[in-house]
Image (cartoon, rainbow, N blue to C red):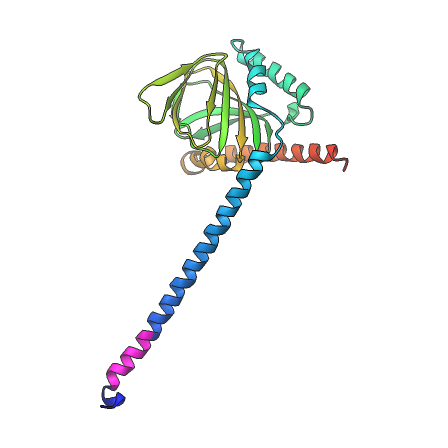
Amino acid sequence: MGRDQYPGITQWVVPHMLVIGFDIMFIIRGLLKLVVFVGVLVLVIQYLHYWLAHKQYVFTKEDVAILAKQYAGRDHEQAFSKVVVELRKHYPGHILPDEDLQWVFVNAGGWMGSMCLLHASLTEYVLLFGTAVDTSGHSGRYWAEISDTVISGTFTQWKEGTTKSETYYPGDTIVHSVGEATSVQWTAGTWMVEYGRGFIPSTLPFALADTVFSTHDFVTLFYTFRVYMKCLLLEANTFLTEAGVF
């Protein structure tokens, strides 16, 4: 029985087999690209993890907490002024000058506060934070460890996997570990000194999501990026000066 006995079937089968073959090759190429992408991503994450674990840092959470506790219980504006002066004394070249300090709103996780960024790099930041009104929401989950020392007011935290909350008062320090998530609540007039260490850019999506998708406050978004860039430029200038370039 000849192959041309069913020409209609042949004409239908051959093109469709070719199409199926092309589809399979397309899927295989897509899977190979995905495997390569995942492999590169894993290597980048491992490198960042190694770098974060072995690099030298400017600050420690203990030193920042000890400094902040000296002024806990005072009027927060006076306390913050003292903290800034002491930080500049202990860490010259790493704290923004007065003319670059700015209080910027932060909307994240359902809560609203205000921050004043003092220092920031790719791996650390120091800022003043607080709220003039009662506010609460989700803490966020970061690739960074964040510690806060309360200057005034009260801060309540409900940790994931527990059924009870804890309240912290002036002088207390709260540590938010890498990958941890909690419910957070600040009473009106709560102000704190905050230090973060880790891959700081990983914190930005949570910190800015409400601003971008909810409040649409792009002026605040601009302020946030502007002060962060000022901090990065200050760090670059200090690094190059200490290296003898300038």
Spot occupied by residue 100 in the image (x, y as percentages of width and height)? 63, 27
Above-or-below relation of 160 to 31: above
Q: Quadrant of the N terminus?
A: bottom left
Q: Quadrant of the C terminus?
A: top right
Residue 25 placement: quadrant: bottom left
Q: Is residue 246 something that shows in the picture?
A: no
Spot occupied by residue 88 in the image (x, y as percentages of width and height)? 66, 21
The residue that appears at 55% across and 39% down in the rendered structure is 50
Residue in front for this viewpoint, 48 or 186: 48
The residue that appears at 53% across and 38% down in the rendered structure is 49
Residue in front for this viewpoint, 196 or 153: 196
Residue in front for this viewpoint, 24 or 189: 24
Whether residue 198 is in magenta: the answer is: no
Q: Main secondary structure of the magenta part?
A: helix
Residue 139 placement: quadrant: top left
Spot occupied by residue 5 in the image (x, y as percentages of width and height)? 23, 89
Tell me how many marks there are.
0
| Furthest residue in direction bottom, as rendered | 2
Tell me which segment is drawn in magenta.
7-17
Q: Is residue 120 something that shows in the picture?
A: yes
The residue that appears at 51% across and 35% down in the rendered structure is 221
Spot occupied by residue 120 in the image (x, y as percentages of width and height)? 59, 31
